[in-house]
Amino acid sequence: MKVGFIGLGNVGSKLAGSLLRNGHDLTVFDLDKDVAQPFLDKGADWAETPKMMAEAVDMVFTCLPSPAACSEVMEAANGVIAGLGPNKFWIEMSTTDANEIRRISELVIGKGAIALEAPVSGGCHRAATGNISIFVGAERSAFEKVLPVLTTLGRRILHTGPIGTASVLKVLTNYLATANLCSLAEALTVAKKTGMDLNTTYEAIRISSGNSFVHETESQVILNGSRDISFTMDLVIKDVGLFDEIAKDHGVPLEISPMILDIFKDGQKRYGPRELSPNIIRRLEDACGVQVLAPGFPAEMVDDEPEEKGAEVFPKGAEVGRL
């Protein structure tokens, strides 16, 4: 099966790398051909346009920064949809709006092709090793057809239900991670101001009921000072904003989510939209006249687990195939 990948950014480049590393016949496209060169050097093919890619391959993955970018790549005259046909697959791996993914999916289905959404969760360091988690929204029959390819991209593959469900769960989990990041920024700053040793503080949190995936990753790059988790403030605002809109659409009166949006909008205003998201702690550092730093922590996260072939995971209490 020939596979195409569009969008070689922080996450997309890692996912495309897994496809190539696992022996897939890969074609790539990005607005910046320079970022594609390492893939071409390793044997991948280049598509001049998304349309040409869709015509040449069996399965097209997209991993793009916003719903608007996805719409442009899919719906332009030389876009993916123009090159799709019967029995071809489109798999959207971006974090995007559930209603938008449903709308574009209908256009894909109208060409006789099969549409799936497959956003990922777990960080760039896990995407690089093929150990990331993948949520898949699609018909069960479509999910089963693409599962063999997805298991080379991620370790845990969850079928979430029909198109749109994966996008809802993805922004929900990103919201939870962001809420945790904000609370960790406050906790670490308080620890610094009270004179606590920050290495000891990190370890206390890690072995306590306050521990989390975010602490074991983002707290480390905060304390290192790099603040580099390959995710930026503008993307946080997009993702939490999508979560906030879902809540509003369904009449849920949120309290924490609007506060988080205000915090990150202020951070973006102060430090710029492409500032790394863990550096939201800088608002507190500036206010308190301190630097929340400690020795011995890495500048970026590296997945130390060996790559393993992925497998489907099933919801607790659910019957296999009921979704």
Image (tube, rainbow, N blue to C red):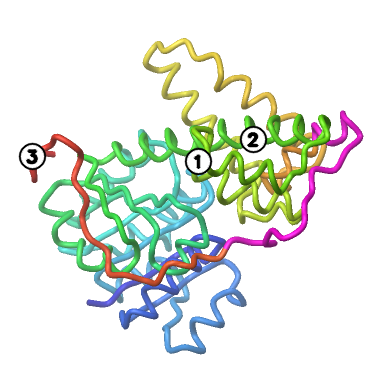
Q: Specify start and end residues of the magenta stretch as a single range.
A: 283-301
Q: Residues within 10 Å of mark 3 (few under 14, many from 20)?
A: few
**Dot 2 corresponds to which residue?**
184
Estimate the spatial distance between the alpha carbons at disc 3 and disc 2, rounded to whole Å: 37 Å
SS category of the residue bearing label 1: loop
* Disc 3 residue type (three-letter): Glu
Which residue is rendered at x = 31% and y = 48% of the image?
135
The CA span between labels 1 and 3 is 29 Å
Residue 289 magenta-highlighted: yes
C-alpha separation, residue under disc 2 versus residue under disc 1 = 10 Å
Residue annotated with mark 1: 212
Marks 3, 2: nearer the viewer: 2
Front residue of this view, candidates 77 and 89 = 89
Residue placed at 83% from the left, 31% from the top?
Answer: 193
Location of the C terminus (image quadrant): top left
- Counting from the top left corner in percent of width and height, residue 264 is at 68, 32
